[in-house]
Amino acid sequence: MAFTIAIDGPAAAGKGTISKAVALHFGFAHLDTGLLYRAVGAKTLDGTDPIAAAQALVAEDLEAQDLRTPDVAQAASRVAVIGDVRAALVDFQRAFARRAGGAVLDGRDIGTVICPRAEAKLFVTASAEVRAERRYQELVGNGTQTSFETVLADVKERDTRDRDRAEAPMVAAKDATVIDTSALSIDDAISAAITAIEAARG
Ligand code: C5P
């Protein structure tokens, strides 16, 4: 049986952690759709045309090693404003969403554009400062040299680009449950997500 859980929200709000935990809890497959845009963005860093890169994308590209860097994140949000790039990635995401056994997809436009009829929708958010602090700790933990101010500016720049674009802007679907993780522990955020999804399952 297909059952789609759409989890949207801005960078470093906790979507990834919540999505993985929810997928494990329900025994569903998980797709981090940001990786699609990161894989396309990474290819453009060596001069490849973004639309051609998106049209030629294969599942193995999502396994590339360097997709988590700030440069690739910025490149991802730049290619993500291009309608033809987004269009090239729709079928893959929709096929994943309707696979037998259930699916969790996290991104920016899953509940609004990719899966408007998803059985459960969450919008996971947090203040820009809290998100930047989390991302900063993560980067420092990986040995990346950066400052909190740089990370905060990066988060805000990406938020603005994702929110203000004409194609599939980042916005909570009208029927999404909004979870603000600013003051929540990871466990409490996961519990809130599971409770909301259980309610949607009936
Ligand atoms: O989620 P993540 O931070 O990995 O996403 C990287 C970028 O990819 C986002 O800033 C956004 O511009 C883009 N993206 C998108 N739609 C999605 C997922 C990601 O536009 N469904």
Image: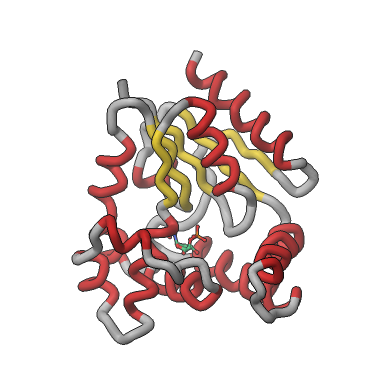
Q: Position of residue 108 (x, y in %)?
A: 47, 52
Colour pattern of the rendering: secondary structure
- In the rendered view, would you say 100 is above or below 143? above
Q: Is residue 140 visible?
A: yes
Q: Is residue 143 left or right of residue 11?
A: right
Q: Is 36 in front, or is 138?
A: 138
Q: Which residue shows up at 45% across the image and 38% down it?
A: 6
Q: Is 190 in front, or is 64?
A: 64
Q: Which residue shows up at 42% across the image and 41% down it?
A: 30
- In the rendered view, would you say 39 is above or below 9? below
Q: Is residue 185 left or right of residue 69?
A: right
Q: Is 71 in front, or is 169?
A: 71
Q: Position of residue 65 (x, y in %)?
A: 43, 68
Task: Report the number of discs.
Answer: 0
Q: To which quarter of the image does residue 157 belong?
A: bottom right
Q: To which quarter of the image does residue 149 belong?
A: bottom right
Q: Which residue shows up at 61% across the image and 32% down it?
A: 193
Q: Is residue 175 visible?
A: no
Q: Which residue shows up at 46% across the image and 57% down it?
A: 169
Check the picture and name the quadrant holding the N terminus.
top left
Q: Is residue 29 left or right of residue 48?
A: right
Q: Position of residue 74 (x, y in %)?
A: 50, 74
Q: Residue furthest right?
A: 183
Q: To which quarter of the image does residue 144 belong?
A: bottom right
Q: Residue furthest bottom?
A: 47
Q: Residue furthest top?
A: 202
- In the rendered view, would you say 131 is above or below 107? below
Q: Position of residue 22 (x, y in %)?
A: 54, 33
